Image: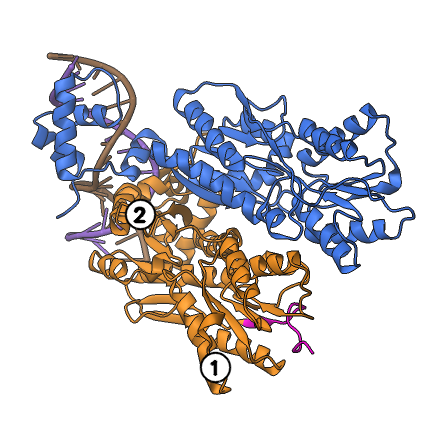
Chain colours: A blue, B orange, C purple, D brown
DNA sequence: TTGTAGGCGTTATCAG
DNA sequence: CTGATAACGCCTACAA
C-alpha cells in the first residue's frame, strides 16, 4: 500500500485536487456535500498531506521552535508538554533549539542561522532568551513571529506571563504574617528579568510593612543549587542570622535547606525557607517547601496558541496574564522563640 | 535581500544546479576545484538549502522524533541535550512525540499516525516505549528506522544501553561491603525492562554473598516519589527493619529518605539508602545520595549518531554499551551498631 | 462553488 | 566528472 497523495483522493471523490486542498485546509467555499465526499475519500485512503510539499508550495514548515538557554529540567518538561498540547491539536511539530545568551556568538546570529536552516514558522522564547530586548526588536524587524513566555516587556506583541512581582510580595507578606522581621532575600541570575521582578516584589512588601531591607541579608544568586549553598554559608556567618530566607527560586532554596540541614538547623523551627516556582524538588525534600506555583504547562499551551494564531492570521497583539498560586508547605513557620 | 536558492549559487559559480546539489550533499564525483568554487559562491550568497524542497524531492524530512512516555524531567533534559548535539552537527531537527504505552489507543497506532503526518526519518525510543517488543517488531516490519535507548533486546538492530544488571549488582555489593545483610529492594515499574534488570542484579549479588532475599523486604514500586514513600512506610512497620534500602531509581529513593527523615531516622547512621540514575535530586537532598550514574546525555548523542548513520546508509546493526559509574555519597554507611 | 495551469526548490535519472 | 530535464506533492493565482 503505497502512500496516498492528493490526486488519489481527488479521483476517488470525483473532484479536482484543488477542491481536496480546500477541504484539507478548512477553507470556505466548498459545498457541504462535496466536503463530505472528500473527507470520506481521504479517510478511506488514509490520506495525510505531505508536509514537505505543503511547506514548499506555501512557504511554511508547520514547525515551531522552542528557544531556551539552560533552563531547569522541570521547567523544560512542563513548558514542552504545554506547547505540545497545542501543536498536537493544530497539526504542528515542535523542534528544540538551545541557544547561548552570553556566548561568543551573538544570540541573533545563532537564531538567524537556525531560521535560515530550519525555516520554522515561529519561535517561543523562554527566560532568559526573552529578556534580551534588543534581540527581540531585531526579530520584529526581520518579521520573525515570536511569543515571549516571560515578564512583560512593552516591546512584545505576544506574551504569556505571571505577575512575578505581586507573587513575590505575597510570599513576603506570608513571612511577615508569621512574625518574621529579619527576612533575607536571595536574588536570581541578573540576566533573568523575572529575578528582578521578584526582588522588587519582596521590597514592595517589606516597605509596606515598614521593615528594613538590610544589605547583609540580600545575596546575589544565580538560580543554581550551588549559589543557594553559598548564600546560606554567608547567612550562617551573620549574627544575628535572619529568621527567614526567601529565595528567588526553588533550586537555590533547596541549596539553602541542604546547607542548613547539614549544619544542624531545623526548618522551620530555627529558620524558615521559602522558594519560587514549585519545581518537583520543593515537594521532595524534607521538609516540603513553601513556594509559588507557576503554571508553566498552561503558559506553554497558551503561548503556542497565540503564536500560531498570529502566524496564521498575520495579526495580533496579545498579552496573557496567568494566575499564580501559593503553595504553603512545611518549610515556613512562625518566628523562632 | 531575498533568500538565495540553488540556481543563484549555480549561476554565481558557473555550474549547473546538479553540481551545487552534489557539493551541498557531500556527494563524490566533483572535482576539488569545482567544489571550492561552489562552496565559495554558496557562502557568499549565504545559501542554505530549503528543507521542504529537499524533503519533497528526496522523500526525507531531516527530522527525527524522540518518543517517550512520562519520563523524569532530568532524564528528558539530558537525553534531549545529547540528541541535539548530534542533530546540530548533522543538520537534523528533533521533534518531540509523547506517547502513551498503556492507553486506549495502541502504541503502534499512535506512532503510525504520527509518522504519516510528520514523516520523520527515524525514531528514538526511550523507556518504557522501547520495552514494547511487539511494537518494535512491527516498526521493523514497516521499515521504520529506530534506535532503542534501553536494555538490550535481541530484536533491536540499533541500541544504546548500560549494563543495568551489573550496575545494580555492584551497588548491592557496596552495601554488603558496608556490612549490611538485611537489604531491602524497591522494584520499579514493571513496564520498564530496566527495572527488572536492576532487580536481577540485586539478586545476583545477594546470592553471590549467600544472603537471603526476604520477600518482606522486596517492595513493588512505580519509579515515582510517592511509591517510594509507600515502600518506606511498609519498611517502617517491619521488625526488625532493614538496615539498608536499595531503590531501583532515585525518585523512589528520595521518597524513602523523605519519609525516614520525617519519622526521625538519621541517614545513614540508622539506615542506608541508595538509588539509581544520579538525577539532580540525588545531590540536592540531605544527605546526598549514593547512586549509579547513567550517562544519559552521551547515550542520547550516540543513539542519534547510529540512527542517522543507519538512515543515511541503509545499513547497520549496532549495539553500544556505555559504561556507568558509581557515585558514592553520604546516604550509605556502615551497619548501625 | 469548482477546476486548470504554473511554480515552489531540491534531488534523481540518464545522458554526455 | 558534469549537466539537462523530469519528478516530488501541494498551493496560489486566475478562470470558468
The quadrant in which the C terminus of chain A is found is top right
- Kindly report the distance in space between the C-alpha atoms of the residues bearing marks 2 and 1: 38 Å
B127 relative to A269, above or below: below
Mark 2 vs mark 1: in front: 1
- Residue carrying label 1: B212
Q: Would you say B175 lies left or right of B88 here? A: right
Which mark, by number, is residue B103? Answer: 2
| Residue stretch rendered in magenta on the structure | B325-337
Upstream in sequence: badge 2 or badge 1: 2
Mark 1 Cα within 10 Å, few/some/many (few <14, many 20+)? few
Mark 1 chain: B
Please report the residue visible at 40 percent of the width from the left and 41 percent of the height from the top.
Answer: B9
Q: Position of residue B217 (x, y in %)?
A: 49, 71
Q: Main secondary structure of the magenta part?
A: loop
The image quarter containing residue B141 is bottom left
Number of labels in the image equals 2
A44 relative to B211, above or below: above
Q: Are marks 2 and 1 on the same chain?
A: yes
Q: Position of residue B170 (x, y in %)?
A: 53, 78
The answer to whether residue B335 is magenta is yes
Mark 2 chain: B
C1 relative to A221, above or below: above
The image quarter containing residue A250 is top right
Q: Nearer the viewer, residue A5 or A189?
A: A189
Mark 2 Cα within 10 Å, few/some/many (few <14, many 20+)? few
A284 relative to A59, above or below: below
Q: Position of residue B35 (x, y in %)?
A: 41, 54
Judge whether residue A118 can be spotted in this image. Answer: yes
Q: Nearer the viewer, residue A70 or A139?
A: A70
Q: Would you say A12 lies left or right of A179 here? A: left
Which mark, by number, is residue B91? Answer: none
Amino acid at each position: 500500500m503505497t502512500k496516498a497523495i492528493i490526486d488519489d483522493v481527488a479521483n476517488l471523490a470525483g473532484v479536482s485536487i484543488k477542491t481536496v486542498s480546500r477541504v484539507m485546509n478548512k477553507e470556505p467555499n466548498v459545498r457541504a456535500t462535496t466536503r463530505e465526499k472528500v473527507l470520506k475519500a481521504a479517510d478511506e485512503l488514509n490520506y495525510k498531506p505531505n508536509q514537505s510539499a505543503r511547506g514548499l508550495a506555501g512557504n511554511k514548515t508547520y514547525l515551531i521552535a522552542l528557544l531556551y538557554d539552560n533552563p531547569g529540567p522541570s521547567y523544560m518538561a512542563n513548558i514542552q508538554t504545554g506547547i505540545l498540547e497545542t501543536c498536537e491539536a493544530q497539526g504542528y511539530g515542535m523542534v528544540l533549539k538551545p541557544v547561548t545568551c552570553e556566548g561568543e556568538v551573538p544570540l541573533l546570529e545563532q537564531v538567524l542561522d537556525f531560521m535560515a536552516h530550519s525555516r520554522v514558522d515561529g519561535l517561543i522564547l523562554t527566560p532568559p532568551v526573552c529578556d534580551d530586548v534588543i534581540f527581540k526588536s531585531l526579530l520584529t524587524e526581520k518579521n520573525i513571529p515570536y511569543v515571549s513566555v516571560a515578564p512583560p516587556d512593552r516591546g512584545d506583541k505576544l506574551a504569556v506571563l505571571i505577575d512575578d512581582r505581586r507573587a513575590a510580595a505575597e510570599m513576603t507578606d506570608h513571612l511577615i504574617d508569621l512574625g518574621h522581621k529579619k527576612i533575607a532575600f536571595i536574588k536570581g541570575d541578573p540576566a533573568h528579568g523575572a529575578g528582578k521582578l521578584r526582588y522588587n516584589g519582596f521590597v514592595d512588601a517589606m516597605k509596606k510593612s515598614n521593615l528594613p531591607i538590610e544589605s547583609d541579608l540580600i545575596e546575589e544568586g544565580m538560580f543554581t543549587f550551588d549559589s543557594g549553598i553559598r548564600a546560606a554559608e554567608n547567612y550562617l556567618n551573620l549574627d544575628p542570622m535572619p529568621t527567614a530566607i526567601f529565595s528567588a527560586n526553588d533550586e537555590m532554596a533547596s541549596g539553602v535547606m541542604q546547607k542548613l540541614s547539614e549544619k544542624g538547623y531545623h526548618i522551620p523551627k530555627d529558620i524558615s525557607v521559602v522558594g519560587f516556582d514549585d519545581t518537583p524538588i520543593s515537594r521532595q525534600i524534607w521538609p516540603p517547601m513553601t513556594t509559588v506555583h507557576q503554571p508553566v504547562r498552561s503558559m506553554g499551551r497558551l503561548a503556542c496558541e497565540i503564536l500560531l494564531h498570529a502566524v496564521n492570521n498575520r495579526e495580533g497583539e496579545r498579552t496573557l496574564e496567568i494566575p499564580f498560586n501559593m503553595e504553603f508547605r512545611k518549610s515556613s513557620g512562625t518566628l523562632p522563640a
